[in-house]
Structures are given as C-alpha cells and as structure tokens.
Image (tube, grey):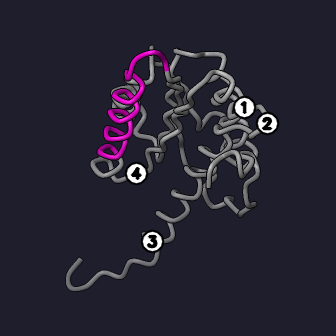
C-alpha cells in the first residue's frame, strides 16, 4: 500500500512491554537534515512511548544515505544493539543518482539483516520531490520514523517469540 493511501503514523497498537530491556540504534543521514532529523525525532519518540528507555536508544549520524550501511555496521560493532534503524532521504534529481544510492542502501541493509541476524530497518525515503519527502516526514502522510520504530519493535517481538518457542533436537 502506498503512503498516499495510508498515514505512516497510524500504527496498530501492540504490547511491547517485554522489549523494555532491548537496545536500539538509530543511524541518521545528515543529508536533507530537515527531513531526516524529523524522521529520527518521531522514531525516537515512538520507541520511548512504546517502553524503550531513552538510555537504551543511541543516535549516530552519517553524512549521507549511501553511508547508512557502513554506519549501521559501525554502530553494531560499537553498541551491539538488538535492532538498528537506518533513516535517510534521497530525493530524485536531474540524474539517476537516486536509483544507484537507493539500490545500494537497500541491498546493503538486506545483507546486514542476514549477516547480523538482527533487525536492520530500512527507513529510507525515496521521493521524487522535496514536497513528497516533507509529506512523509511529519506532513500529510504522517512520519516514516514512526513506521520504522514500529517495524523494529515488531521484528524484535517476532524474534523473541521465535527464540522462546524454538525446541532443540538432540544434544544441546
């Protein structure tokens, strides 16, 4: 469903109290900071509202969206968080640079999800215009930062549920 058909800030309420001890790292692009900092603020606020203590949330910055992958890898090494949320914004310009950056970030974050075996959330806006970006960073379509926070929490909850219910076969 596209964001024009759904407000990104309208999320189904769930019980995340069992995740209060989890740590979450935000990696935020400084490029288009009026947009990305709004995403980060909404993301952090949502995590805190859902029970993650502010001292369990780290926020680190990278120069641009392309650096979100390396930044996520570095914060994983530094903090070993339970989940990582990568937040950025690449606005279509006169060239195809956006396609290359967006694809590189998507592929890199997928690889980190698999390699790290923990949620690494794709919170990259890929709009055609700055207006579309602002609409998704607290404007008429809500805030993608809220959605990114909820994605991390839901994936942590799923991971905890699966790990609790995994039965071992044979010797442990």
Question: Would residue 83 appear left or right of 48 to someone viewing this image?
Answer: left
- Say if the magenta span includes residue 127: no
Residue for badge 4: 118
Give the residue at x 37% y 27%.
101
Q: Is residue 90 above or below residue 7?
A: above
Question: Would residue 89 appear left or right of 3 to someone viewing this image?
Answer: left
> In the rendered view of the protein, which quadrant contains the N terminus?
bottom right
Give the residue at x 43% y 34%.
79
- Which circle marks residue 135 in the picture? 1
> Badges 1 and 2: C-beta atoms under 8 Å apart?
yes
Give the residue at x 79% y 36%.
140
Q: CA distance from mark 1 to mark 2?
A: 5 Å
- Name the spot of residue 4 as percent of width and height, x first: 70, 45
Point out the tag, 2 or 3, that comes first from the N-terminus: 2
Point out the tag, 2 or 4, that comes first from the N-terminus: 4
Q: Is residue 164 above or below residue 97?
A: below
Residue for badge 2: 140
Give the residue at x 55% y 26%.
59
Mark 1 or mark 4: which is in front? 1
Q: How many marks?
A: 4
Q: CA distance from mark 2 to mark 4?
A: 32 Å
Write down the region rendered in magenta. Answer: 93-112
> In the rendered view of the protein, which quadrant contains the C terminus?
bottom left
Residue for badge 3: 162
Point out the tag, 1 or 2, that comes first from the N-terminus: 1
């Amino acid at each position: 469903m596209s964001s024009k058909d759904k407000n990104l800030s309208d999320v189904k309420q769930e019980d995340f109290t069992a995740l209060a001890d989890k740590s979450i790292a935000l990696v935020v692009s400084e490029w288009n900071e009026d947009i990305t900092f709004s995403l980060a603020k909404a993301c952090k606020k949502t995590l805190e509202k859902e029970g993650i203590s502010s001292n369990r949330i780290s926020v680190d910055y990278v120069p641009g969206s392309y650096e979100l992958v390396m930044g996520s890898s570095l914060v994983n090494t530094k903090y070993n968080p339970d989940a990582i949320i990568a937040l950025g914004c690449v606005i279509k310009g006169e060239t195809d640079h956006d396609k290359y950056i967006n694809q590189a970030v998507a592929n890199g974050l997928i690889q980190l999800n698999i390699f790290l075996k923990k949620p690494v959330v794709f919170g990259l806006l890929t709009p055609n215009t700055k207006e579309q970006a602002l609409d998704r960073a607290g404007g008429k379509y809500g805030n993608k930062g809220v959605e990114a926070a909820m994605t991390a929490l839901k994936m942590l909850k799923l991971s905890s549920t699966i790990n609790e219910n995994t039965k071992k076969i044979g010797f442990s």
